[in-house]
């Protein structure tokens, strides 16, 4: 038994890591035993590595702490890749530990052996490989130093996944009753820096802000953050700026947030769009959902575009970036509104807010006049019935779009998540399940059928998840391909894009002990959420129906704005 591995578990414990996700295997036994026998960790066991990694991602996202993820060698490790890519682009800390054979056994046709060195390269912040010898004092020093580095790299100002590959020689299991050698541990702590612009830069930014009358702030995907919300609201009042925040920005609780930009930008022609063009664009956070917003900003480029980001690669999503301000957005918005109130022109903000309010009313009128059930109508009802203090998980891809067109209301105490780092359909259920294991509040997953059946191994384990509620929009295929421009009219659409499937979720729910309901009336929602869980509500529809309703929604908005 390698005493040094126990010292690594001790380092993880000292760093405040609480959860370990384990995927069973033999080569990884030394790692598994080190963490399980340590006694301080909550261990979770999942056999499907792809799903396990998304579950770990959900847990890490909820707890804002790195989660340890352990696999054995070979394709087991490779199956972590989709979730690692998602964690990388969503900046979620994961500490991935993979077991491997020693170097000399790679490419020798030995079992369960692939090329694991740097296997996740490109989608981890850093990767290390340890020595197969764990007994030499320098190897122990190397392993402990690497482990500390891995933890603080994962947690840095722009968090993300990190990977350590552990080659192990046999024997992999301890001799029964043999004591674990004591190896003293040393944890190298690192505090993430507080990034602020210099007083000179901030003065210059304040000075430049005065020159702009048409300031547009776009919040990208981000978790709910009260201090940030307050700072942005104060800034927008102070500078008569507009705040656009889609459903994944978690800014719906700020009353003046423009939540329906996707809807009205898609309905306006280029001349009317031009009347909304900013002269200064300020962005922060991760990606935005709306293609209409991206196209609008790429077409009507601002004079300046500042992106607020403390550290790391800054995206030029709107092809207009002129400045990266290396600071926490809370700090920037507070500092930029600290002086006396500016006498700014209010017309720009009023123009955006008038469109926002007109669109919000149009959305409500459309659904009031469109009889349920349709999948879009059901999403409208669902959003109005979400339990207080719940978390809404939006699967890719129509669920997240529907929810963004409708929007949440200001008073709703609901947090929203989606895997928009890579926009994959492969781990949406597992990620929601990770949240359900880390957070006792109600977790509501809105998903399409392909994403749902794809990821059904999210339920294949012994962990209870009574707080999970799933709303399944079963249109029997990838409905999005029938709704978007492009494949919509191709003869190949049903066979090669939508790929129809006939099943419903009743049998799957029975197999995994999930209460099953079929949607028939709006009166069902409160009982569905209040009843004992886990539970799934299935809403069946056809792509033809959905296409008619979605297109009439877009036409309605065009005539309304
Ligand atoms: C892992 C992965 N494979 C393929 C895709 C491409 N893709 C995007 S949406 C989609 C269909 C999703 O269907 P469903 O979950 O039923 O949702 P709906 O489109 O009906 O809303 C596919 C295959 C993807 N995003 N991720």
Image: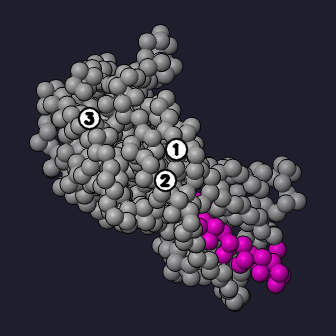
Foreground label between 3 and 1: 1
Tell me the magenta residue range: 133-161
The answer to which quarter of the image holds residue 521 is: top left
Q: Residue 10 vs residue 547: left or right? A: right
Residues at marks 2 and 1 touching, judged by CB atoms closer than 8 Å: yes
Which of these two is toward me, 471 or 389? 389
The Cα atoms of the two marked residues, 2 and 1, are separated by: 10 Å
Q: Residue 268 vs residue 522: left or right? A: right
Q: Residue 489 vs residue 539: left or right? A: right
The answer to which quarter of the image holds residue 97 is: bottom right
Residue highlighted by disc 2: 208
Mark on residue 304? 1
The residue sitting at 46% across, 59% down in the picture is: 206
Image quarter where the C terminus lies is top left
The residue sitting at 85% across, 50% down in the picture is: 107
Residues at marks 3 and 2 touching, judged by CB atoms closer than 8 Å: no
Q: Mark 2 or mark 3, which is nearer the start of the sequence? A: 2
Residue highlighted by disc 3: 355
């Amino acid at each position: 038994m390698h005493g040094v591995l126990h010292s690594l578990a001790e380092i993880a414990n000292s760093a405040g890591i609480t959860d370990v996700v384990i995927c069973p295997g033999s080569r990884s036994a030394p790692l598994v035993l080190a963490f399980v026998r340590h006694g301080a960790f909550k261990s979770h066991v999942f056999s499907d590595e792809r799903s396990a990694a998304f579950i770990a991602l959900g847990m890490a996202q909820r707890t804002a702490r790195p989660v340890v993820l352990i696999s054995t060698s070979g394709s087991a490790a490779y199956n972590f890749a989709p979730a690692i890519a998602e964690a990388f682009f969503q900046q979620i800390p994961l500490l991935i530990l993979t077991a491997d054979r020693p170097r000399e056994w790679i490419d020798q046709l030995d079992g369960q052996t692939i090329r694991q060195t740097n296997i996740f390269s490109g989608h981890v912040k850093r990767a290390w490989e340890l020595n197969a010898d764990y007994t030499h004092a320098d190897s122990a020093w190397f392993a402990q130093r690497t482990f500390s580095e891995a933890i603080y790299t994962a947690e840095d100002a722009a968090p993300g996944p990190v990977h350590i590959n552990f080659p192990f020689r046999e024997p992999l299991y301890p001799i029964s009753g043999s004591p674990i050698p004591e190896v003293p541990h040393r944890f190298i702590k690192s505090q993430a820096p507080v990034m602020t612009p210099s007083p000179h830069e901030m003065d210059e930014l304040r000075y430049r802000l005065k020159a702009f009358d048409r300031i547009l702030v776009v919040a990208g995907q981000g978790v709910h953050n009260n201090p940030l919300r307050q700072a942005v609201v104060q800034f927008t009042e102070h500078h008569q700026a507009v705040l656009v925040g889609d459903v994944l920005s978690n800014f719906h609780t700020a009353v003046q947030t423009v939540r329906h930009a996707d809807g009205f930008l898609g309905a306006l022609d280029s001349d009317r769009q031009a009347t909304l063009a900013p002269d200064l664009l300020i962005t922060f956070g991760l990606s935005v959902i709306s293609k209409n917003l991206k196209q609008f900003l790429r077409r009507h480029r601002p004079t300046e575009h500042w992106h607020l980001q403390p550290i790391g690669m800054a995206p030029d999503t709107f092809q207009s970036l002129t400045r990266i301000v290396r600071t926490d957005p809370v700090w920037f918005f507070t500092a930029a509104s600290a002086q006396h109130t500016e006498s700014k022109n209010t017309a720009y903000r009023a123009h955006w807010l008038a469109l926002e309010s007109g669109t919000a009313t149009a959305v409500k009128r459309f659904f009031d006049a469109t009889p349920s059930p349709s999948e879009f109508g059901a999403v409208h009802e669902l959003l109005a019935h979400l339990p207080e203090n719940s978390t809404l998980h939006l699967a890719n891809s129509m669920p997240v779009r529907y929810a963004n067109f409708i929007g949440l209301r200001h008073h709703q105490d609901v947090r929203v998540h989606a895997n928009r780092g890579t926009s994959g359909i492969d781990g949406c259920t597992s990620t929601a399940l990770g949240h359900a294991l880390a957070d006792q509040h109600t977790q509501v997953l809105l998903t399409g059928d392909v994403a749902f059946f794809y990821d059904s191994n999210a339920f294949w384990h012994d962990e209870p998840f009574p707080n999970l509620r799933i709303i399944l929009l079963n249109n029997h295929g990838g409905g999005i391909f029938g709704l978007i421009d492009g494949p919509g009219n191709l003869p190949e659409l049903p066979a090669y894009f939508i790929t129809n499937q006939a099943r419903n979720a009743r049998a799957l729910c029975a197999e995994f002990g999930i209460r099953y309901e079929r949607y028939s009336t709006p009166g069902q929602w409160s009982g569905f959420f209040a009843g004992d869980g886990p539970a799934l509500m299935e809403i069946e529809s056809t792509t033809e129906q959905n296409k008619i309703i979605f297109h009439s929604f877009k036409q309605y908005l065009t005539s309304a704005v």
